[in-house]
Image: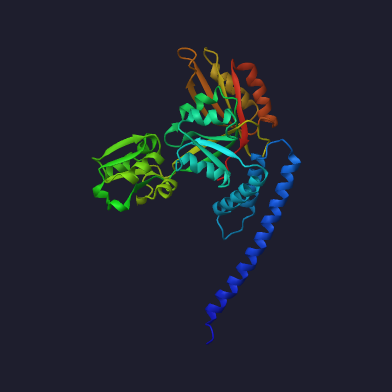
Amino acid sequence: MSQPPSELEINRRRDAIDALDRELLRLLNERAAHAKIIGTLKGDTAAYRPEREAQVLRTMRAENSGPLPDGAVTSVFRQIMSACLALEQQLRISYLGPAGTFSHAAVTKHFGDLVDTEPCASIDEVFRAAEAGRTDYAVVPVENSTEGAVGRTLDLMFQTPLTIVGEVKLRIDQHLLVNRAFGITLADVTRVYSHAQSLSQCVQWLARHLPSIARIPVASNAEAARMAAAEPRTAAIAGDAAAAIYGLDILAAHIEDEPNNTTRFWVLGRHGAAPSGRDETSLVMSAHNRPGAVHALLEPLAKHGVSMSRFESRPARTGLWEYLFFVDLEGHQEEGPVAAALSELRERAPFLKLLGSYPAAVA
């Protein structure tokens, strides 16, 4: 019995896909072989080069003609680079755990799946793990688009020997999660667990849909998911990763009040990053306690045409009403305008510490 034309066309295209898959596998292994040789040629220098990875991802996005969306192309090439890098060196990354937190998701987005991870109980411990050499890099949250700066990260950056070598911008999707095995509906929920910041990011939704239930802050979204998995009539606010890890179902999706809710993370290491073509430089500095002192610090930036994307003040903890200023600049510290502005800033600021120059996040 002859096949209909549509079935013949499907089989023909499946055969073409099979042939392409074999060719992709051959090319992937050829790429991996080059990466492995490069790792040998590097010697003792760092295997992970953030500027190189950023350049590859930007090029692939620029040359993408579809139908795959740019985000899918970025994800595929991130995993390819993760696999190739693992042939050179198996990286270990510390982050604010446990598994399933948004920090964990940021690690995966930036480094891919083929790295070892070390979840830590606090941001302090994330720093200590990398500073002591237990991990190669640390991933820490620095600011959220709705909640503002993560103060503890900024305070620790003031004293750490680690350098910022990369950044991750993670879209935060908050979901209401439950264990369906308990037969829970929205009307059954009597309490919801989550990290305090996530609870605050979903205030309006909770007020509309669960106005009288107990809202209980816990150490992390992942911990909230673990507790909800074990307790009847309980829900958690967390992301997709926590739902998958703890076997929870999404009772209500995307309940965050701000639809563009995004958290920015820094990747910290013990080496710098070379210019990538689109970079940022972060620094912390102090100002003299006199009128016009802050304005004087900003003058070199305007003079040399350097754009400032962030200016955040924090108590200096060294004296009453003394402040430190955390600044993000567009450009790399080795590039002319930024280098010239920094040279003048060093002469004007009582204290200045460069936190790092690094590739701007690739979406």
Q: State the residue at coordinates (66%, 20%).
A: 344
Figure quadrant of residue 287? top right
Q: How many marks?
A: 0
Q: State the residue at coordinates (63%, 21%).
A: 345
Q: Nearer the viewer, residue 226 or 257?
A: 226
Q: Nearer the viewer, residue 139 or 248?
A: 248
Figure quadrant of residue 172? top left
Q: State the residue at coordinates (55%, 47%).
A: 113
Say left or right for 321 vs 336: left
Q: Position of residue 184 (x, y in %)?
A: 27, 51
Say left or right for 240 vs 308: left
The correct choice, above or below, for 352 with respect to 29 in the image is above
Q: Nearer the viewer, residue 330 or 355?
A: 355
Evaluate whether residue 256 shows in this view. no
Residue farthest to the bottom, as pictured: 1
Q: Position of residue 241 (x, y in %)?
A: 45, 47
Say left or right for 207 vs 151: left
Evaluate whether residue 155 shows in this view. yes
Asked which colour scheme the image uses, the reply is rainbow
Say left or right for 54 vs 168: right
Residue farthest to the right, as pictured: 41
Q: Position of residue 90 (x, y in %)?
A: 62, 42
The correct choice, above or below, for 122 with respect to 244 in the image is above
Q: Position of residue 15 (x, y in %)?
A: 61, 72
Q: State the residue at coordinates (64%, 40%).
A: 50
Q: Nearer the viewer, residue 7 or 308?
A: 7
